[in-house]
């Protein structure tokens, strides 16, 4: 018996992994997909034509950047469901509006008119009965100290140069967002409860928990 059937995880399930930088979204996405024989969907940052311009001028390009991300994530979400599900998705479309666009607006990088336009477009595209929401959003969480330690350990140059205050702000914004998120079922998972790299067998308790969670949320009203 394969692990998907063992833990009663539907073969057409769509599971999205969310959380701030450093919590291990990509690792979780890859490992779950391997064990469940699911496909993966990763964020395509490098293909965004506004990215370089945005880093050179936040105020001019933040709206364009967010609109592009919204369109690409919307198309990817449609593709996943048109394919028939069976996907693990790295990062959700909901984080764009709930965290990043909101942050740009509050920091003065996006005008009120642009922010309202973005939110209205997001609501028209995503917050409708016709948009296919994930069956489950797994939110990876941890203390700020744990996340900072992970960011330090993986040693990415851009992240090492980023002030700690930025990570503190992102941690707080993510916690505020998830505490008010109710668009699809959410399973919160502390990053200290498993180690998918050093202890590969730690994934089976997670699969059991996911299967049980999906069973009890099958009637969730999307």
Image (tube, helix red, strand yellow):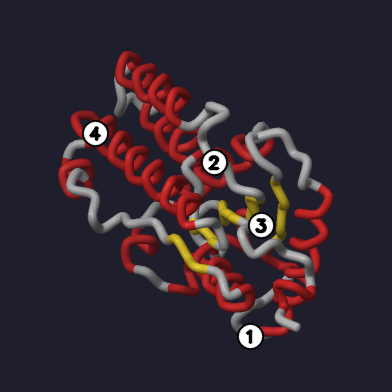
Instruction: Give residue 216's position: percent from left, percent from top.
Output: 83, 49
The residue drawn where x is 60% and y is 82% is: 197
In the depicted structure, whether residue 75 falls above or below residue 176: below
Q: Quadrant of the C terminus?
A: top right
Q: Quadrant of the N terminus?
A: bottom right
In the depicted structure, whether residue 77 falls above or below residue 90: above
Report how far apart the C-alphas of labels 1 and 4 lie in the structure.
41 Å
Which of disc 3 and disc 2 is earlier in sequence? 2
Which of disc 3 and disc 1 is earlier in sequence? 3
Report how far apart the C-alphas of labels 1 and 3 lie in the structure.
18 Å
SS for callout 4: helix
Q: Which mark is residue 64?
A: 4
The quarter holding residue 155 reads bottom left
Q: Which mark is residue 132?
A: 2
Query: Which residue corresponds to mark 1?
Result: 198
Instruction: Give residue 112's position: percent from left, percent from top.
Output: 35, 15
């Amino acid at each position: 018996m394969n692990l998907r059937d063992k833990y009663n995880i539907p073969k057409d399930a769509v599971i999205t992994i969310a959380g701030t930088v450093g919590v291990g979204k990509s690792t979780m996405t890859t490992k779950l997909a391997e064990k469940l024989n699911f496909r993966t969907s990763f964020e395509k940052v490098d293909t965004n034509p506004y990215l370089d311009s945005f880093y050179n001028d936040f105020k001019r390009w933040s709206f364009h950047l967010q609109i592009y991300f919204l369109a690409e994530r919307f198309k990817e979400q449609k593709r996943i469901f048109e394919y028939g599900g069976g996907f693990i998705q790295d990062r959700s479309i909901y984080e764009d509006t709930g965290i990043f666009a909101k942050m740009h607006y509050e920091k003065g990088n996006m005008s009120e008119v642009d922010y309202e336009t973005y939110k209205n477009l997001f609501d028209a595209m995503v917050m409708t009965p016709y948009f296919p929401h994930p069956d489950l959003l797994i939110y990876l969480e941890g203390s700020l100290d744990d996340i900072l330690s992970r960011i330090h350990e993986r040693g990415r140059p851009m992240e090492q140069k980023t002030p700690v205050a930025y990570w503190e702000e992102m941690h707080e914004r993510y916690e505020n967002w998830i505490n008010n998120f109710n668009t699809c079922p959410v399973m919160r998972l502390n990053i200290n409860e498993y180690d998918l790299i050093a202890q590969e067998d730690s994934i089976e308790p997670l699969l059991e928990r996911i299967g049980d969670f999906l069973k009890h949320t099958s009637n969730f009203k999307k």
